[in-house]
């Protein structure tokens, strides 16, 4: 099954899909999906992504994501790298990420 998915530096746009079915994914990179015309990946990080328990690296930098981090992101106990720079996220970090 798929372990690593890198779709960075393309021109994908729209909201982030529900990828919960990719339960064995360890690395997900959707960074830098910002087109010259202003289209980008937008919206919030799906709470369902907290179900991707094998995820070790999540890179979503330089898109147009908004909202706050879902509390379920803190349930990703294997997560070692989280890259979210260059978005418009707000709020507080989930308590489980502070440890």
Image (spheres, rainbow, N blue to C red):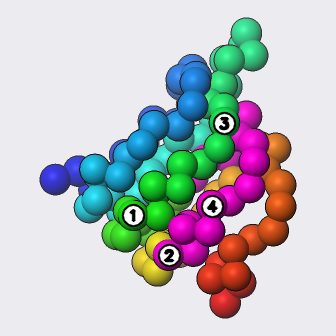
Using the image, tell me which numbered label, if any, was put on residue 43. Answer: 3
> Picture quarter containing residue 48?
bottom left
Q: Seen in the image, is 62 located left or right of residue 13?
A: right
Few, some or many C-alpha atoms within 10 Å of disc 4 (few <14, some 14-19, many ≥20)? some
Upstream in sequence: badge 2 or badge 1: 1
Give SS at disc 3: strand
* Residue segment shown in magenta: 59-75
Q: Which residue is mark 1?
A: 51
Q: Residue at x 69, y 54 (%)?
A: 84
Marks 2 and 1 in Cβ contact (< 8 Å): yes
Q: Earlier in the sequence, mark 2 or mark 4?
A: 4
In this view, 92 is above or below 36: below
The picture places residue 57, in percent across and down from the top left corner, at: 49, 63
Q: Quadrant of residue 62?
A: top right
Say whether residue 68 is magenta: yes
Mark 2 Cα-neighbour bin, 10 Å: few <14, some 14–19, many ≥20: some
Residue 75 is marked as: 2
Asked if residue 27 shows in the view, the reply is yes
Q: CA distance from mark 4 to mark 3?
A: 12 Å
- Indicate whether 65 appears above or below 99: above
């Amino acid at each position: 099954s798929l372990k690593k998915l890198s779709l960075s530096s393309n021109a994908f746009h729209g909201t982030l899909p529900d990828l919960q079915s990719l339960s064995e994914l360890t690395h997900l990179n959707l960074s830098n999906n910002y087109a010259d015309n202003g289209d980008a990946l937008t919206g919030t990080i799906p709470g369902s992504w907290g179900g991707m328990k094998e995820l070790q690296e999540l890179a979503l930098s330089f898109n147009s994501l908004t909202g706050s981090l879902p509390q379920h992101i803190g349930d990703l106990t294997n997560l070692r790298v989280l890259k979210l720079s260059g978005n418009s996220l707000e709020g507080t970090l989930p308590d489980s990420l502070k440890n």
